[in-house]
Amino acid sequence: MITKEQVLEALKNVEDPDLKKDLVTLGMIQDLEVEGKNVSFTVMLTTPACPMKEMIHKACVNAVLFYVDESANVNVKMSSNVSARKSSGPLLPSVKNIIGVASGKGGVGKSTVASNLALALERMGAKVGLVDADIYGPSQTIMFDVVHEKPMIKGAEGNNKIIPVESYGIKLMSIGFFADTSQAIVWRGPMASKALIQMLSDTEWGDLDYLIIDLPPGTGDIHLSLVDAIPLNGVVIVSTPQLVALADAKKGVAMFQMPAINVPVLGIVENMSYFTPPELPNNKYYIFGKDGAKNLAAELGVPLLGEIPLVQSICEAGDAGRPAVMQENTPQAIAFMEMARKTAQQLSIQNAKTHVAQPAAV
C-alpha cells in the first residue's frame, strides 16, 4: 500500500534547479491523492513560463517509481502560482511583479522587446499588463494596433479610474492614448514623471502576474521617479551588438545597480543579433558584431536572456500591430518565447532570494 508520506519523502529528492531546494520544502506539491497504485498531485511552479517544466515533471514521476513503487501509476499536473518579491505598494496593490524594460540609448528595439515579452508571457498563461512609459516617443499603441482606441473612465466623481485598453489579452496604458500621433510631447522632466506616475496609479489594472514597463531610453528623471514611487522587481536591459550600444547598456546596468536605486538586473537582451536570409535559414550573418551582449553579460555577472535575430518581419509585425511572437514557429517567435522564459526564470530566482512565501504542500 502506497502512502502519502512515502510519496512526499520520495519527492524530497526532486530539486528545483533554480531555487536549489526540493519541491516539498518549497511547498510546491499540492493536491496529493493516493488510491491503491494510483498517485496524483500538482506541482505548483513559480511561473507558467518555467523553462524547466518538462524536466521537473519527468523527475517527479521517476522519483515515485524509483523510491516508492515501480509499478505505480503516477499522474502529475503542472500548474503555477506566480511568485512576488514584495508588495507593489499602495499604487499597484494587485500587481505581483513589475518588470522594467530599459536601454542605454534609443533605436535598439526596446519597445519591440517589451511588447513581445508581454505577449509571450501572456501566451504562456500569465495575466499581463504593459505600460508605455516612453513619454516622449510612445509606440505601443501602434505595435498593438490600438492607435484609435481610447481608455474608458469609471467610478464616482473624485475617485475615477481609467480602464486600460486590451489587445491580444494584454492590458495596455500609454500616453499615446491621450495625444495625437502627430503631436510632439514637449514636457520638462518633472512634468513627464508626474504624468507617468499618475497614469500608473489611476489605472484599474485588476489582478496581474506581470506588469511590463517600457521605459524611455537613457538614464534620467523618469527612471529615478519611477523607482522612487514603485518597487520594480527587476529590469531587462536591451542592446544591440555594436560597441557604442553596449557602452550605453553598461551604463544602464550600472544605474539600476546603484545603492540608491538597487533594482535587480534580470539580464541583457541582444536585439538585431544576427541576420538570417529566408532562403538560407541555417546561415547566420553577424552584421553588427558577434557575442557583444554575451561578453558584456559575462563581464557584469548578469544573464544573457536572449539573442533576437535581425528579421524584416519583426519590423513589419510591429508596424502592422501584430507583435512578432504571434508568428508561431518562426525563428523570431521562438527567440522571443525563449527570452520570456529566461526572464520569468530569473525573476523567480530573484523573488526566492527575498524569502517569498510559497504555497503550502498538501
Image (cartoon, grey):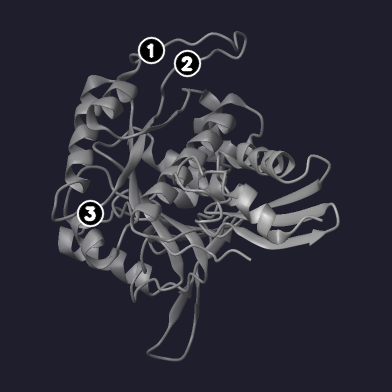
Q: How many marks?
A: 3
Residue position for label 3: 223
Identify which amino acid the numbered label 2 is placed on. Phe
Residue 278 location (% of width, % of height) = 60, 14
Q: Secondary structure at mark 1?
A: loop
Residue 230 at least partly seen: yes
For this view, does 96 lie left or right of residue 12?
A: left
First in sequence: mark 2 vs mark 3: 3
Compared to residue 82, the image places residue 251 above or below, namely above
First in sequence: mark 1 vs mark 2: 2
Residue position for label 2: 275
* Image quarter hosting the N terminus: bottom right
Q: Secondary structure at mark 2?
A: loop
Residue 215 location (% of width, % of height) = 32, 50
Identify which amino acid the numbered label 1 is placed on. Ile
* Image quarter hosting the C terminus: bottom right
